[in-house]
Amino acid sequence: MRIVIDYTPAVRQAAGIGRLTRHLIRAAAPLLAEHRVTLFVAGPVPAGHPERAGWPPYVQMADTAIPERALTILWHRAGVPLPAEVWAGRCDLFHATDFVLPPTRAPGILTVHDLSFLRFPECAHPHLRRYLMRVVPRSLKRAARILADSQAAREDLVQLLGVPAEKVAVVYGGVEERFSPAPEPAQDAELVERFGLSAPYILSLGTLEPRKNYVRLMRAYERAWEEAGGDFPELVIAGGKGWLYEEIFETHRALRVREHVHLLGFVEDRFLPALYRCAWLFVYPSLYEGFGLPPLEAMACGCPVTCSNAPSLPEVVGDAALLFDPMDEAAIAQALRRGVEDSQLRERLRAAGLARAAGFTWQKSAEALIREYAQVMHER
């Protein structure tokens, strides 16, 4: 069987969906040895790009001379029915990994990671929201099978866009083996040297954009710091600029305790295990997630987690995290104080988190993905 997988987000996006796609497809590749696999990338990929390397011989990459944005305009605005097979070659199955299914002659599998642009439209850039509201429903109708990152995301697809429930399957994300509580003195020292960080600190991680709820987190932290009389770990927020992030920086500048709140910017993958491992507490205040990888990675590193009770996070963290209402700054502040000051709670969360994270592996994710590939081909 000839399988084409849209690998564009893995090449173009360092965080978020890019990371999910990279890890899932890397894990799935060894399970596809009986097939011919093409990784389709919109736009040119330089010969020395790291994502070109490390694949088995039955996996090849096909990029386009047309830039990604131009191809998006041709396909989804101008409606030019130029099939992806022009670059990827003939295929029996096409897996679109990032919300939108391009023109293709093959049965299509479509991954829709979340419906935040419908759940929280004010948190998305207006242009992106309008684009997704137009093209995602069209792609869903054309797809033979739809993949969601969680049961919560699956339910949203059914309830908000009327997708038949039997058409949607869940493929969870996983945690890499490098995320572990085992001490790595060299990594920890490099973390201190690179960012000036030393334990203890409270960590939050994710792209700087409204849905991540950093404005409320910083205000809640200020409340917790003052209630504790200043005897409180510093807050570190790691994440690159996304969109509509101006209020985050305005709030930071206005904090009375801003010298205790650090915005690190984007942090490379190689620093993440040490960043989690050295944290006193990990906090994830997001208003909505299709999955939520950072809390699991923090758990796998032995870091106690407190996070939002918004979809799909309770589904992911189970009873291994302290949950709070992300709209309630007082509740966030209380969770921060409990997570910092209650040593017995911290130890329980640490042990439960390690056990919970162990259940999410990229091997399991890849096996679930391959089952969906087989199901679609069986139904042809």
Image (cartoon, rainbow, N blue to C red):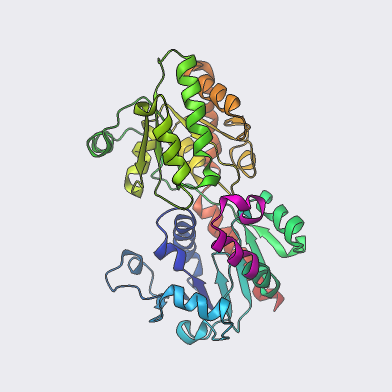
Up-down relation of residue 361 to residue 133 (above or below): above
User: Looking at the picture, how far across and down is residue 340, in whole percent?
Assistant: 47, 20
Q: Please report the residue visible at 70 percent of the width from the left and 72 percent of the height from the top.
A: 141
Q: Is residue 172 above or below residue 340?
A: below
Residue at point 63% right, 65% down? 372
- Residue 187: x and y in percent read 27, 38
Position of 279 relative to 158 (above/below): above
Q: Is residue 51 visible?
A: yes
Give the residue at the far left of this rendering: 193
Residue 274 or residue 31, whichever sits in front:
274
Residue 124: in magenta span: yes
Of the pair 164 and 52, the residue shown nearer to us: 164
Q: Is residue 278 left or right of residue 286?
A: left
Front-lying residue, 331 or 87? 331
Question: Residue shown at 48%/26% (left/top)?
Answer: 221
Question: What are the residue bounds of the magenta stretch?
Answer: 117-134
Q: Is residue 122 left or right of residue 84?
A: right
Image coords of residue 310 (percent x, y)? 64, 40
In the displayed structure image, the side of residue 244 where residue 258 appears, left or right:
left
Q: Is residue 42 visible?
A: no
Figure label count: 0
Where is residue 254, by image quadrant?
A: top left
Q: Quadrant of residue 370?
A: bottom right
Quarter of the figure that contains the N terminus: bottom right
Q: State the quadrant of the C terminus.
A: bottom right
